[in-house]
Amino acid sequence: MTTTSSATPILSVQLYTLRTLGDVDGILSAVAAAGYRHVELVGSHLENAKPVAEKLAQYRLKPSSAHVSMAALRADPEKVLNACSVLGLADIFMPSVPADERQSPAEYWRALGAELAGVSDTFAKSGVRLGYHNHDWELAQKGDGKTALDHLFEGAGTSPLAWEADIAWIVRGGADPEALLSRYSSRVTAVHVKDLAPSGENVEEAGWADVGSGVLDWHALWPVCVASGARLMVVEHDKPADPISSITNSFNYIAKMGA
């Protein structure tokens, strides 16, 4: 069944963007000053959930979601659920597979999808939605015309496994974001909002750009994402030269869009 939504999504920011700032106070202070009210946590924040929850309250921020590694999900799922309870998290996403597994065959991706499906079924009983976050390697075809992402979601079957669609990585992978969002709209709950610099530019930032300063048309993409079911729109820059300026520029651009 296809799920669509016209409700105003939550705007958040992935704290990985500000990792070079170091301490939590510096990161959360910068986020609040930029205008955000929600953040997407990284896995280490769930390791010490209570003090992080206290810091978030201090800066009047709420966690929209979090990234949690497959290793953590495998090692101690109950610990992850407990951290979600402390932080008030209802959405978590497995962010990536190890580098040496990214070119794996179709069987690997179907098995991963099935494993994530099992965890998503368990977590759903506690009110936590588990999803998968893509990069570009999941868009590689596996010899049968299907991509790794196709095989992963096939492996997940009818489970509640969700999807956090990273639009800029989708474009880097040579796929059409609108077509892919439409195909898997029943799984879309969140989107990473980021941008790509023109070819050959922002080399020191690995080719990424602040939202609105790159080549992606976010005026067109935003409503497509929301219509596909995204309730969380999460700003991210993988390698910003100036993290504070980056999240501020992106926030201001999105605000001017009226989103």
Image (spheres, rainbow, N blue to C red):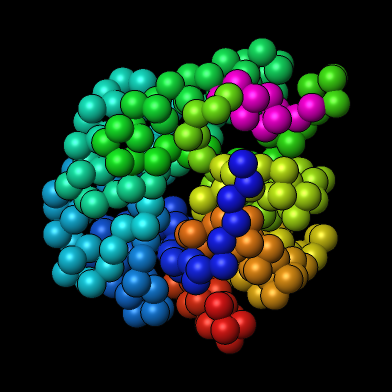
Residue 59, quarter of picture:
bottom left
Residue shown at 18%/56% (left/top)?
53
Residue shown at 27%/36% (left/top)?
126
| Foreground residue among 138 and 196 | 138
- What span is in magenta? 146-156
The C terminus lies in quadrant: bottom right
Q: Residue furthest front?
A: 1
The N terminus lies in quadrant: top right
From the image, give the main secondary structure of the stretch colored magenta.
helix
Q: In the visual, does 46 lie left or right of 221?
A: left
Is residue 13 on the magenta stretch? no
Q: x%, y% of residue 135?
A: 63, 42
Q: Residue furthest top?
A: 107
Q: Is residue 128 above or below residue 109?
A: below
Is residue 154 on the magenta stretch? yes
Q: x%, y% of residue 235?
A: 52, 63
Q: Is residue 199 visible?
A: yes
Q: x%, y% of residue 12?
A: 43, 64
| Foreground residue among 121 and 200 | 121
Q: x%, y% of residue 88?
A: 24, 52
Residue 152, quarter of picture:
top right
Q: Is residue 192 visible?
A: no
Q: In the visual, does 226 lie left or right of 219?
A: left
Q: In the visual, does 54 lie left or right of 177?
A: left
Residue shown at 79%/22% (left/top)?
142
Residue shown at 61%/82% (left/top)?
257
Q: Is residue 253 above or below residue 78?
A: below
How many marks overall? 0
